[in-house]
Amino acid sequence: MSRERLFLEEPFRSLWAGQDPFVAVEALAGEVFRELEGRRTLRSEVAGRGYFVKIHRGVGWAEIVKNLLSLRLPVLGAANEWRAIQRLSELGVDSMHAVAFGLRGRNPGRQHSFIITEELSPTLSLEDFCLDWKKLPPGVRLKRALIDRVAQMARRMHLAGINHRDFYLCHFLLHLDPAPTADRFRLSLIDLHRAQLRAQLPRRWRDKDLAALYFSALDIGLSRRDLLRFLAAYFSCPLRQILRDEAPLLSHLASETRRLQARFERKVAAGEMT
């Protein structure tokens, strides 16, 4: 028996009435950001609004086995991102808004699925927003407010058993309308297709997320005091206790950062970052 799940909000509920949504989603056109054998990501305009569309056509059992042998969990389809978005919404962590989701098939290697999310615009990634902070430092209050907010989002997510697996500054979008101030701004977490959801998050996955975030913030001019501020907000306890109880984490941040830097340099050398 075929397994099928479907969720449609407007405008797709009306646009696709009487159609097979799994055929209709493949017909959407727009700017393609990623095109692989089993996955396609594009931006499409529908009824005058922008949407991001991710289509998964099944990665095949060979790819699944290869990932498992490499001790990596394969991304099988859109269901992962769909569940993560719903869970973050329940936690009060700003993320994307999914307007359509579909899944068909029981065979993980051939499963057909898709997710459509509203475009978050106008926004700027934190990576780009912080790009010139070394030369042009931001206002102290705004910098502290952003550090606190990122820490709180990470804390809520991790306490709820979710780890992102691509937890970099580029996946935090700062909303630009209205213009962000220390007292009023919105930050949304995106790209959740690799996220893992559990009842309780293992420490090593928590530490991997934090190391990735630390690595992505290395060159934006943050001070040791800024790092300590993040840790205090994330753990919500006195710094003396953090430095005592989380010594393994602080050591891991240094070693994992070296590993991520080496991987980044290998990708640059291989031309994979273009």
Image (cartoon, grey):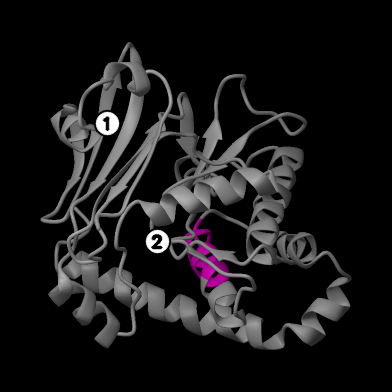
Q: What stretch is highlighted in magenta?
A: 209-219
Q: Is residue 8 above or below residue 96?
A: above
Query: Dot 1 surroundings within 10 Å: few (below 14), some, or many (20 or more)?
Result: many
Q: Can residue 199 be found in the magenta stretch?
A: no
Q: Is mark 2 on a helix, strand or loop?
A: loop
Q: Which residue is drawn at 16% across and 73% down?
A: 61
Q: Distance between the residues labelled 2 and 1?
A: 19 Å
Q: Is residue 268 above or below residue 141?
A: below
Q: Residue 14, located in which quarter of the rendered image?
A: top left
Q: In this view, does 266 lie above or below 245?
A: above
Residue 257 picture location, percent across and down: 47, 76
Instruction: Report the side of 133 relative to 263 (left or right).
Output: right
Q: Residue 73, located in which quarter of the rendered image?
A: bottom left
Residue 94 picture location, percent across and down: 60, 40
Residue 22 vs residue 1, the one in the foreground: 1
Residue 96 picture location, percent across and down: 49, 38
Q: What element carries label 1?
A: strand
Instruction: Report the side of 85 relative to 45 (left or right).
Output: right
- Residue corresponding to mark 1: 43
Dot 1 amino acid type = Arg
Residue 248 vs residue 139, the one in the foreground: 248
Residue 244 picture location, percent across and down: 81, 86
Q: Residue 66, located in which quarter of the rendered image?
A: bottom left
Residue found farthest to the top: 48
Prevailing secondary structure class for the magenta stretch in the rendered image: helix
- Residue corresponding to mark 2: 194
Residue 71 vs residue 251, the one in the foreground: 71
Q: Which residue is drawn at 73% across and 82% down?
A: 246
